[in-house]
Amino acid sequence: MCLEANRDLTHSEMQSVVAAELRKLWEVVETEYRLPNGRIADIFAECNGMALIVEVKTSIKTSIIQEVYRKYSRHCDYLVIASPFQLEDESQIHAGLGWADFELKKIGRWFVSWHEITALRSPALLR
């Protein structure tokens, strides 16, 4: 069991950890939620008319941020990418984003571990 806490979580384990934390604060939390466009959001949460989508990724890079925004931004008020802790500098990830990608910087970034979720950057309102 000691070794278990030292390995990175799988996609489904991260999804479970994040969903469990969101259920403490949000009225509705669904995993594998089908959106009106037919895409599946890893986690969809709703509270007081506000919608949050959390996309769980095992790694992160600029192209993933762009793809997540393209796929989900029209279907939520807040958007977050959750991933295991990475040693990459967040500024390096955003170095590939130009001024036209200002909206992408509104996406929240959470690091997920067995014991906690750390908000590297809180999401900003998309609309």
Image (tube, grey):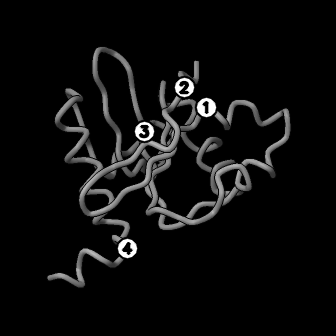
Foreground mark, 2 or 3, reads 2
Amino acid carrying mark 1 in the image: Lys
Mark 1, residue position: 106
Mark 3–mark 4 Cα distance, whole angstroms, equals: 22 Å
Q: Type of residue at label 2?
A: Ala
Q: Residues within 10 Å of mark 4 (few under 14, many from 20)?
A: some
Question: Which residue corresponds to the image point at 67% horizontal and 37% vertical from the top-left?
Answer: 104
**Residue 24: image x %, image y %?**
17, 35
> Would you say the residues marked 4 and 2 are in contact, meaning their CB atoms lie under 8 Å apart?
no
Residue carrying label 4: 8
Disc 3 is placed on an element classified as strand
Q: Nearer the viewer, residue 102 or 8?
A: 8
Decide: marks 3, 4 in contact (CB < 8 A)? no
The residue wearing badge 3 is 53
Secondary structure of residue under mark 2: loop
Amino acid type shown at disc 4? Asp
Q: Seen in the image, is 83 located left or right of residue 49?
A: right
Q: CA distance from mark 1 to mark 2?
A: 5 Å
Q: Amino acid at mark 3?
A: Ile
Quadrant of the frame with the C terminus: top right
**What is the secondary structure assignment of the residue under circle 4?**
loop
Quarter of the view holding residue 45: top left
Instruction: Please give left or right for residue 33 compared with residue 94 in the image.
Output: left
Name the image quarter holding the N terminus: bottom left
Q: Residues within 10 Å of mark 2 (few under 14, many from 20)?
A: some
Q: Sequence order check: which comes first, mark 1 or mark 2?
A: 1
Which of marks 3 and 2 precedes in the sequence?
3
Residue under label 2: 124
